[in-house]
Amino acid sequence: MILLSRRSQLAIAAVVDVALHARPSPVAAKSLAARHSLPPRHLETLLQALVKAGILKGVRGPRGGYELAKERRRITAGEIVRAAMADGAEDMDTAPNSRLVEQVIHPLVEQAGQLFLNQLDAVTVEELCRKSGEKDVFEGIDVGADFTI
């Protein structure tokens, strides 16, 4: 069973990738897309949603890109998922229109979703960076670097 949309999974991956690769210069969307085998335009709206949510910071210019807007230990997976869902949320008009869905099923799904997000709130980008380092996901990347001002 898949509990997170592809968009939410990609949002978490993008933030962890930026956390690992944004030093000494910001991560270009093109580089990020290449590492995840995606067309760059596919990521832009997601990255902008993460900027709008205060998770990433966009840097303009020829050497521009994205970097973390705050320390990775202060960013949770739940926060990232909420940002991705807010920007690409499903239109509820497409859901079945019935009292059963409205009064029973939807509240149950909402409650389960909130519990799931609460669990993700306990996971920080710092932890995800550490695990990716342990598994050497991006061969040779130093996972010790963190947010700097």
Image (tube, helix red, strand yellow):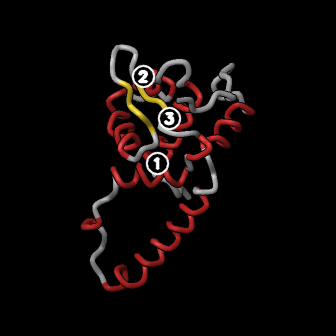
98 left or right of 121?
left
Residue highlighted by disc 3 = 68
Residue highlighted by disc 1 = 8
The x, y position of residue 119, in whole percent, is 61, 61
- Count neighbours of disc 2 (C-alpha within 10 A) and say few if under 14, some if 14 to 19, many if 20 or more: many
Q: Residue furthest top?
A: 62
Mark closer to the chain start, 2 or 1: 1
| Residue for point 52% across, 31% down | 18
12 left or right of 133?
left
| Residue for point 67% across, 43% down | 127
Query: What whole-number distance in Å separates the C-alpha atoms at marks 2 and 3?
Result: 13 Å
The x, y position of residue 62, in whole percent, is 35, 14
- Count neighbours of disc 1 (C-alpha within 10 A) and say few if under 14, some if 14 to 19, many if 20 or more: many
- Helix, strand or loop at mark 3: strand
The x, y position of residue 138, in whole percent, is 63, 25
Mark 2 vs mark 1: give the one in front.
2
Q: Residue furthest front?
A: 149
- Helix, strand or loop at mark 1: helix
- Helix, strand or loop at mark 2: loop
Query: What whole-number distance in Å separates the C-alpha atoms at marks 1 and 3?
Result: 17 Å
Identify residue type, mark 2: Ala
Mark 2 vs mark 3: give the one in front.
3
Q: Nearer the viewer, residue 143 or 116?
A: 143
Residue highlighted by disc 2 = 28
Query: Measured along the vertical axis of the image, is residue 64 above or below residue 95?
Result: above
Disc 2 and disc 3 in contact, CB within 8 angstroms: no
Quadrant position of residue 64: top left
Q: Quadrant of the N terminus?
A: bottom right
The x, y position of residue 38, in whole percent, is 42, 29
- Count neighbours of disc 3 (C-alpha within 10 A) and say few if under 14, some if 14 to 19, many if 20 or more: many
Query: What whole-number distance in Å separates the C-alpha atoms at marks 2 and 1?
Result: 20 Å
| Residue for point 54% across, 18% down | 24
